[in-house]
Image (cartoon, grey):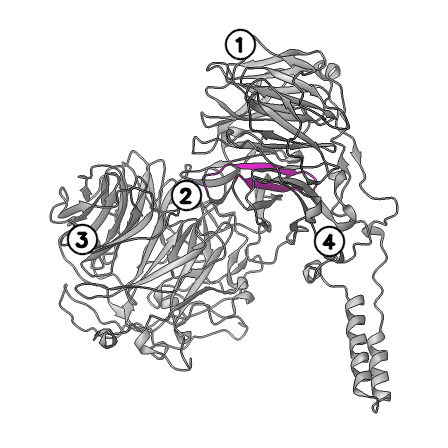
Amino acid sequence: MSNKRFQNISKFRNSLGKPVKKELWYSDLPINTSSSSEASNLIAVSSKWLAIKWNFGAGGTLGILPINQVGKFNAAGPAPLLDAHTSSLSDWDFSEFDSDLLATGAEDGVVKIWKIPEQGLEATDEAQKPILTITGHGRRVESLRFHPTADKILTTSFAKEIRIWDINAQTDLSNPSLVLANHGDIVQSFAWKGDGSLLGSTSKDLIVRVWDPRVNPGEAVTSGKSHQGPKASRVTWLGNRDQMLTTGYDKMRYRQYSLWDVRDLSKPIVMNTMDAGTGLIIPLFDEDTNKLFLIGKGDGTIGSIEISEDLKPSIEASRPCSTTVPQYGAALLPKRLLDVMQAEIARLMVVTANAIVPVSFDIPRKQYLDFHAELFPDTKGDVPALTAAEWLTGETKLVAKVSLDPKNKKPQQLPASSTTSVISPPATTQTPTQAPTPAATSSLAPQAPVAAIPTVQGTVNTAVTSPTIPLSPITVTSPTAASRFAPTRTSYYRYIEGKPYHPSQHYDDLRGLSTNKSSEFDLIQVNRLFIAVTLSGAGGRIGIFPVSKPGRLPVKISAVMCSAEVTDFKFDPFDPTVLVTSSDDAKIRVWKIPEEGLVDDVAEPTAVLSAPHMDRISHLVFNPTVKNVLLSASADRGNSTIRIWDIEARKEKIALTGSHDDVIYSAIWSYDGRLIATTSKDKKVRIFDARTKEKITEGPSHDSVRASRLVWLGETGRLASIGFGRGSSREIIVYNTADLSTGAVDKKSIDVSPSSMVPYYDTDCSILYLAGSGDRSIHTYEVTIHPSNSGNKVPIINSLPTVELLTLQQGFAFTPKRHCNVRAVEIAKMYRLTPTSVETIGVNVPRSRTEFFQDDIFIPTHDIENPSLDSVAWFAGENKELRRVDLRPVDMTPLSQAPPPVIAHKKEVVRETINSNVTSSNDQFKNMLNTDKSTDQENSNDLPQNALEGVADEEWDD
């Protein structure tokens, strides 16, 4: 009979994890979720501060947020920013023994030590200087961590070395105290044992090592083969045990974790394969509960396992916790800040695209009136066990432990005017001077410090006791008037809905779609008359069918035959019957499509454009304001060239040669048709004057050499590039078109995926749409310009609701704004290409008074279907803006001129009727109550988001 029933059952087996309420998030933050180092958790947490990488400039800025201030970030107030480095940050960490002491490392190889002021950072504070600078790395700092037991010992890694520094020095450092240099390749991750005696590391040579730095820094104590996949790995030490855990990939790129006995690294105790996710797993271990949290970058769930302390450890998986949004990093909140009276055993601070989401792990209990001591053993305090000098001379001690029982803490001394809850720091540190915003009043807010009743551990394996350490009194001040987390402006578009039209308006049974194209290729083009898609088959076929005939498409779609594989195609924006194509034979063909559509395949174009050295044409782009002016980009046998053509004259007019060092990935016109922006494989973005051929400015593009796409952000003076950071992290970079050399002025990570994205920017609504090939969703962002403290305009990319759909997409194309249904407040209409159909999708803004024309949303729009100039005038140097058109139907009154809603007072009449007919039947009474309810609904002036409930009448039509 099995003896399983007699085994010890963990008291943490029923732990439940869930994100806290949204009002307790740190939300609407401009977070930069990219890092040059895979070892970074993208967040550091102390008992007073949260440090995240700010989406600003070159990536060397940290946002230092008070941990007691939750809610929405107010972009209009002073920013709590630390301009730490001129190059991109790679890693950062707070000291466990000083909540204000922060270390940062960057790509320039410099490490800086900072002391955060007690009152926090102010944007106007120009005295932000590090207290110590560490140089001598020579290359990017991959990772850095403070020592777990000794005060002011900092460990850094770069290239093939791990360096240990005594940062008590009064002057800048360049020579470390210890160097662990015998790694076979780049160090990817390291972790200290709980008592600070040993250090484990993983490196790019696929070896896991254990070091005794003070005994023999030149040689690892033991080593073994780690994860054999080509991607990075991470390591964490399981407290003070002789065990480590690593995460990484196998040869098939499946994610896995391994448990090691550090005394024998010849093979792992346990190696478990998890899944085929692309994001590296961040392991976070809580030694009080023996729970290990597994956070996959880009995942939407948090896994957790419990590892027993047996000689042959058992591993029990807990229920995964869904965060509902992609996560990019995480850190554990200090144990002393948990809400122990609600049986909260751990809290993760999870980094998402635009928020820090606290995720709480609780143990269900029948009552929460008493302290459940069995769940909360004494935990590490914040008093270091050793000085740096003591540790370097060979001493080893454990940090004194403190009790989490609230009975052992002194009462808080709150001022009479304080009405908000308080998150206090540990007893051995100073208290913050700022109180939380009212939104922070919740049982999930971290508690005040507990009394420090440590059980001081002596030398390893020898325990002695120590007298109680007294608490200092706690003081709290009211929140400042200019709180960073005050309410912000509400966007018109925060509740936009994207949904397909009725199936009868789709184009079904699409056969023979050709998807074997480069990532820069758009598979669908649309105008008011036709839809064009690429079809498979010899000769380079572009299938064309009318917009006016939705439903099942014919088995054979009529096409233009281009004689060679098509490399790009575009409709003339000013003539819906003109199509241009480029193909592998280095020719540009101009086609004239009858207004009634094609009845058969067409092989003879109206005109053919070519140039002597033109080869491998990759892009065709019409000028957005001028008739018959076309841009082409081609490789030209290593001499990438931009050409500008006059289609009417059928000749090349301008050529920009020698301006690119590698293949051009993207080329676009500015909104006014005067400038050209490009990105290329050399990771540069450039802007040229189209007619003078002068290069106006040049700057860095994405870190990855993979293809990127550009989109001009209307009249904002900004340019956006959509591409990849390191790995498969998709991202948006925004530039100031006046000077690209300064790099990104704003940057936002999207998610982790290998597929490229097609952009579209709505200049009227300032909304950026992004669709990834093979995705089921369309990402939307609002680009707003906020004044910064310097007076310059800084773009902020705010996430809007994602358009979630059921089928996989291959691309999309938008119609001009005048074809939207403004009566239904439809702000965008697109045609979404799937492998077997073209779906019509509308994007609407919920509004309560749709009988009026929403003139706050539908501003006069540019008439992009009629040119402002012809080609002759433009080549002669003339400039003229497109005219604007009013979208308001003649029979609709603008909302700005609408009378205020009339609110009837039938409720009182109904109540009087009820009172005067007390003897009426129950049926009559119910009818009057129903009348009361319907009257309230008809005459209420609810917010637009309340109109989201229910289904519109037209949705019931077949």
Residue 94 shows in the view: no
Q: Residue at x 82, y 54 (%)?
A: 851
What residue sits 14% from the left and 63% below the top? Answer: 460
Mark 1: which amino acid?
Answer: His
Instruction: In the displayed orientation, state which residue is furthest to the right.
Output: 891
Residue 642 rendering spot, x and y as whole percentages: 57, 18
Q: Is residue 91 above or below residue 108?
A: below
Q: Which residue is mark 4?
A: 958
Which stretch did the figure color magenta? 753-773
Query: Is residue 274 part of the magenta span, yes or no?
Result: no
Mark toward the viewer: 1 or 3? 1
Considering the image in quadrants, where does the N terminus appear? bottom left
Asked whether disc 4 touches disc 1, contact meaning CB atoms under 8 Å apart, the reply is no
Does dot 3 land on a helix, a strand or a loop?
Answer: loop
In front here: 76 or 586? 586
- Please tell me which residue is depicted at 65% across the width and 15% down the height of the picture: 645
Classify mark 2: residues with Cα within 10 Å, few (<14), some (14-19) or many (20+).
many
Tell me the distance, in whole angstroms, between the alpha carbons under discs 4 and 1.
56 Å
What residue would you read off at disc 1?
613
Q: Which residue is mark 2?
A: 84
Question: In which quadrant of the rendered view does residue 558 lie?
Answer: top right
Comparing labels 4 and 1, the label whose residue is closer to the camera: 4
Residue 402 at what x, y percent from top left? 28, 71
**For the residue marked with disc 2, what is the amino acid?**
Ala
- Lower position in the chain sequence, tag 3 or tag 2: 2
Q: Looking at the image, tell me whether mark 4 or mark 2 is earlier in sequence order.
A: 2
Dots 3, 2 in contact, CB < 8 A = no
> Could you say whether the residue bearing mark 1 is in a helix, strand or loop?
loop
Specify which label sits upstream in the sequence, 4 or 1: 1
Real-space CA distance between mark 1 and mark 2, rounded to the nearest whole angstrom: 49 Å
* Image location of residue 761, percent across then percent down: 63, 38
Query: Tag 2 or tag 1, which sits nearer the N-term?
Result: 2
